[in-house]
Image (cartoon, rainbow, N blue to C red):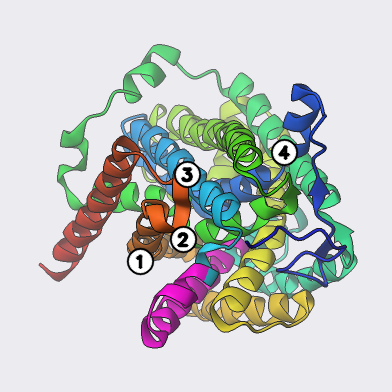
Amino acid sequence: MYKLPTTATAPFCPSAVSHSVAVPANASLGRKLMLFVGPGLLVSVGYMDPGNWATAIEAGSRFGYALLFVVVLASFSGMLLQSLCSRLGIATGRDLAQLSRERYRPGVARGQWLLAELSIIATDLAEVLGAALAFHLLLGVSITTGVVLTAFDTLIVLALQGANFRRLEAIVLGLITTIGACFFVELVLIKPHWPDVAAGLRPSWDVLSSQEPLYLAIGILGATVMPHNLYLHSSVVQTRVNGDDEASKRSAIRFSRLDTIGSLSLALLVNAAIMILAAAAFHGSGHTEVVEIQDAYHLLDPLVGGALASFLFGFALLAAGQSSTFTGTIAGQVVMEGFLQAKIPCWQRRLITRALALMPALVGVIWLGEGAVGKLLVLSQVVLSLQLPFALWPLIRFTSDRRLMGPFANSRLVASIAWSLFGLISLANLTLLYFWMA
C-alpha cells in the first residue's frame, strides 16, 4: 500500500517546500481542523488572481449585477471539483498527474501534460499582466516596464527555499487577508444598492443568450475553476500525514473538505466583491465601457471621494499576482513530476514558466497597446476554460472508479453532478467556438 511521505522532503517541490504536516491521532477536533487548514488556501489563490479581476470588472461594468450568479455557481462548482481532487489524493496516495501517466497510453498522457502546461502558462500570463499593471498604477512606470519587472519574482521563490508548508500557507493567508480587507473597505466606500445585488444572484439564462455575456461567463468560469488547480490540490493535500487506514483517510477527507469549502468561500466573497464594486461604481453611474483595470483604478477616485480606494485597488492587485506566484510554481512542479517523472529545482521551474509567459505578454502589450491588458487577461481565462474538460474527464473517471478508490469512490449523486458539470462546461465552450466561427 502506498504511504504518505513522512520524511523531511515533500515529493513534489523539494527545493521550495518541505516537511509534511503530521496530524496526531489523539488531537482534539479543533486541533485537527487547524492542522488540515492550508491546502485549500493554496488552491483558493488561483480563484482570485488578476484574471478573475479582469473578467469580474468587465462583467460588472457592462452588465451590472446580471452575471453575479455565474460567479456563485462557478465557485460552488469549484468547491465540488476541488473536493474530488482532495479525495483522490488522500484515497490513493497519488495525484491526478501521476494517475493519468499510469492509466493512459503514453501519447494521451503526453497530450494531457502539454495542455496542463499550457494552462499554467495562461495562468502565469494573467499574473504577469496583473502585476505589471499594479506596478504601473503604484509606481507610475509603463506597463511594458512593469512586465519586465515581473521577471524578478523568481527571487521570491528563491527566498522560500526550504520553507515548510505551514509557513507558505501562512504567507498566502496573509495575502488573501490583505486582498479581502482592501475590497471590504472599498465596498464600504462605494455603498452598493444591496437589493439589486440580491437580484443578481438569481440565475437568468436569458442573459447568456448572446455572444458577449457568454464570452464573459466562460471567462469567469475559466478564471474560477483552473485546470492546474486540479493537479495541484490532489498533490498538496497529501502533506497532511494522518495514517493509512480507512478510518484515518475518511477523517482526512472530511477535514480536507471543510478546508476546501471554507477557503473557496473566501475566494467567492472576493470575486463577488470585485463584480459588485465594478457594477456599483461604473455600471450604476453610466460608465458601462470600463473594461480595463487601469480605467477602474482611475475612475474610483471621483466616485468615492479620494485616492484611498485607488491605492487599495493597486495594492490588492499586486498581492493577488504575487500570491499566485507561489501556487503556480508548485503546480508546475506537480505536473512535470507527475507526467514526466522529471525533477528540477523550483526556481528553475519558475524561471521557465515566467519566461514562457513574458513573451506573449510583451508581444501583446507592444502590438495591441497598453490599453489591451484587460482584453488579454479575459482571453487568458477563456483559454483556461477551453482546457478545463481535458482535466475534468480523468478526475471524474478516477474518483468514480471503485477499483481505484475503494470505499471512497463517488456516490451516484456526486458522479451525476460532476458529469453534468463536465457536460455543461463542454457545451458552453462549444457554443462559444460556434459563435467565433459563425
What separation in Å lies between label 2 and label 3 (alpha carbons)? Answer: 23 Å
Relative to the observer, which residue lies in front, 318 or 233? 233
Distance from Cα at disc 1 to Cα at disc 4: 29 Å
Tell me the magenta residue range: 99-127
First-in-chain label (2 vs 1): 2
| CA neighbours of label 4 inside 10 A, class few (<14), some (14 to 19), many (20+) | many
Q: Earlier in the sequence, mark 3 or mark 1?
A: 1
Alpha carbons under labels 2 and 1: distance apart: 8 Å
Callouts 4 and 3 close, C-beta under 8 Å: no
First of labels 1, 4 by sequence position: 4
- Which residue type does callout 3 highlight? Phe
Residue drawn at the location 38% of the way across and 87% of the way down = 107
Tell me residue 160's x, y (percent). 86, 63
| Disc nearest the viewer among 2 and 4 | 4
x and y, in percent, of residue 187 in the image: 59, 24
Residue, far left: 438
- Residue on which disc 4 sits: 36
